[in-house]
């Protein structure tokens, strides 16, 4: 690994520690969490704050900087599908009273790029604040992997007894997902949490993202109706993007 690569990787590790659960960090807490010398982490924080990716909040505390918002806006602006898909996600959340989400495939990782909890009923579900999701244990992950024709990422952790980890079982489920056009997870990431996901397709049928719902397993009795709602929402987005499938 080159020095430049190591420097960038270290900066990314620091930035990824800031999330909805932890919006601020102190120098000492970061150094302890990263198991690095305070002087090393201090240099990283100074550099990131100097370019606007972090901001000093006083008393040694740091938060995310405004420049990240500019980068985020530029990213979403470069994705023609994001705005209509995000609108569909919001409508789904309001109409179903469930957590709705948009996910994309990045290598063999699945990233939740947007979620909405508007009007959600019932208890929390697993992964409400996670950005990177276990591809083999979530509906969105299984959908995107299957449609991309990918094998299960290795290693495949067994989160629950229902987590799918074997190659043979995955090959069968992957074929089923491609045939049915949707994916379902039942208690595979955490007991009591299930999910449904369908693809958002663009012109030519290209798979752009997964649109889905996360719900308490007890509500899977309504899976058929929820899938119809999901597929209709995804079809509307696809139509605006030129998909006529």
Image (cartoon, grey):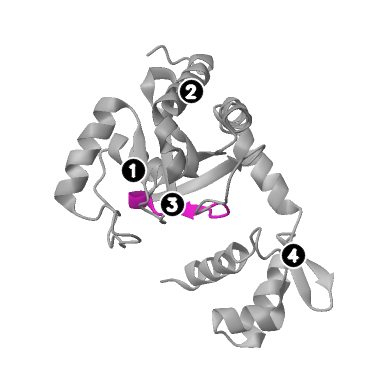
Instruction: Please name the residue that numbered disc 4 is placed on.
Output: 63
How far apart marks 2 and 1 lie (CA) works out to 20 Å
Residue 134 is inside the magenta segment: yes
The numbered dot on residue 192 is 3
Q: Earlier in the sequence, mark 2 or mark 3?
A: 3
Q: Earlier in the sequence, mark 4 or mark 3?
A: 4
Label 1, residues with CA under 10 Å away: few <14, some 14-19, many ≥20 = many
At 47% from the left edge and 35% from the top edge, which residue is drawn? Answer: 212
* Front position among marks 3 and 1: 3
How far apart marks 3 and 1 lie (CA) works out to 18 Å
Q: Provide the secondary structure element on which disc 4 rests.
A: strand
Q: Earlier in the sequence, mark 4 or mark 1?
A: 4
Is residue 108 visible to the viewer in this orientation of the structure?
no
| Rendered location of residue 101, percent (x, y) | 53, 39
Instruction: Please name the residue that numbered disc 2 is placed on.
Output: 229
166 relative to 211, above or below: below
Residue 159 is inside the magenta segment: no
Left or right, 220 with reference to 9: left
How far apart marks 4 and 3 lie (CA) works out to 34 Å
């Amino acid at each position: 690994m080159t020095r430049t690569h190591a420097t960038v990787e270290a900066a990314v590790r620091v930035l990824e520690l800031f999330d909805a659960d932890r919006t601020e960090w102190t120098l000492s807490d970061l150094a302890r969490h990263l198991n690095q010398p305070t002087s090393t982490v201090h240099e990283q924080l100074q550099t990131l704050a100097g370019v606007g990716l972090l901001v000093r909040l006083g008393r040694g505390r740091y938060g995310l900087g405004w420049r990240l918002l500019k980068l985020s806006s530029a990213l979403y602006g470069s994705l023609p599908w994001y705005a209509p898909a995000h609108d569909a996600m919001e409508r789904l959340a309001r109409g179903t009273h469930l957590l709705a989400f948009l996910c994309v495939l990045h290598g063999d990782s699945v990233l939740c790029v947007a979620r909405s909890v508007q009007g959600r009923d019932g208890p929390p579900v697993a992964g409400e604040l996670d950005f990177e999701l276990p591809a083999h244990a979530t509906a969105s992950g299984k959908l995107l992997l299957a449609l991309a024709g990918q094998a299960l990422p290795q290693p495949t952790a067994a989160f629950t007894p229902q987590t799918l980890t074997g190659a043979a079982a995955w090959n069968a489920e992957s074929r089923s997902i491609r045939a049915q056009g949707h994916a379902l997870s039942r208690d595979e990431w955490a007991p009591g949490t299930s999910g449904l996901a369908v693809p958002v397709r663009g012109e030519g049928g290209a798979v752009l993202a997964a649109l889905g719902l996360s719900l308490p397993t007890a509500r899977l009795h309504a899976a058929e109706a929820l899938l119809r709602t999901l597929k209709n929402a995804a079809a509307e987005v696809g139509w605006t993007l030129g998909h006529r499938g």
